[in-house]
Amino acid sequence: MLKLYHSPQSRSMRPRWLLEEIGAPYELVRVDLGKQEHKTPQYLQIHPHGPVPALVDGDLTLIESAAICAYLADKFPARAAWRPRVGHAGARPLLPVDVLQRWRRSSRRCCRCS
């Protein structure tokens, strides 16, 4: 099972949001930054630099939110249909501006509906 190390109001919200969107089963491990839990020896074994997020999937550990999101989209391609698959003819890196443009297009549609 996937295990996401997370702290609210941090970059770990990105992969947590994606995990919820794709409906993947995962365990959420809360890391209290105020209590310096990200500097404990146990957490530093998972993420040597200390910040969140970190995702553990079996023997694989990922520690950057963008890398985690790309990994999840590749691991669950049917659930992350918004992202071209690696090796697909139309595949290219998904940039933050792409996400923003898609959000703007979808929010315009919602505004017209109301």
Image (spheres, grey):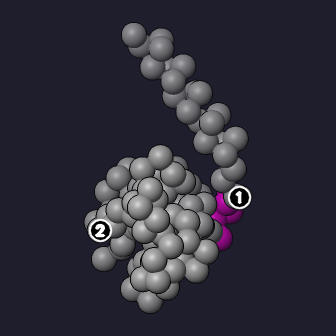
In percent of width and height, residue 60 lies at 48, 84
- Please tell me which residue lies in front, 9 or 41: 41
Q: In this view, does 22 lie to the left or right of 100?
A: left
* Majority secondary structure of magenta residues: loop
Q: Where is residue 94 in the image (x, y as percent from the top left)?
A: 66, 53
Q: Which amino acid does label 1 sit on?
A: Arg
Find the magenta span and give its range.
87-91
Q: Residue 112 carries which label?
A: none
Question: Disc 1 designates what residue?
Answer: 92
Q: Residue 27 carries which label?
A: 2
Residue 16, image quadrant? bottom left
Q: What element carries label 2?
A: strand
Residue found at x 39% / y 86%: 58
For the residue pair 76 and 19, the one nearer the viewer reads as 19
Which residue sits at x=45%, y=20%?
Answer: 110
In the displayed structure, 57 sits above or below 111; it is: below
Quadrant location of the C terminus in the rendered image? top left
Residue 62 in the image, given as x and y percentages of width and height: 54, 75
Q: What residue type is labelled 2?
A: Glu
Please check the rendered image and state whether residue 89 is part of the magenta-colored stretch, yes or no.
Answer: yes
Q: Is residue 103 above or below residue 72?
A: above
Corner quadrant of residue 25: bottom left
Characterize the local packing of mark 1: few (<14), some (14-19) or many (20 or more) Cα atoms within 10 angstroms: few
Secondary structure of the residue carrying tag 1 is loop
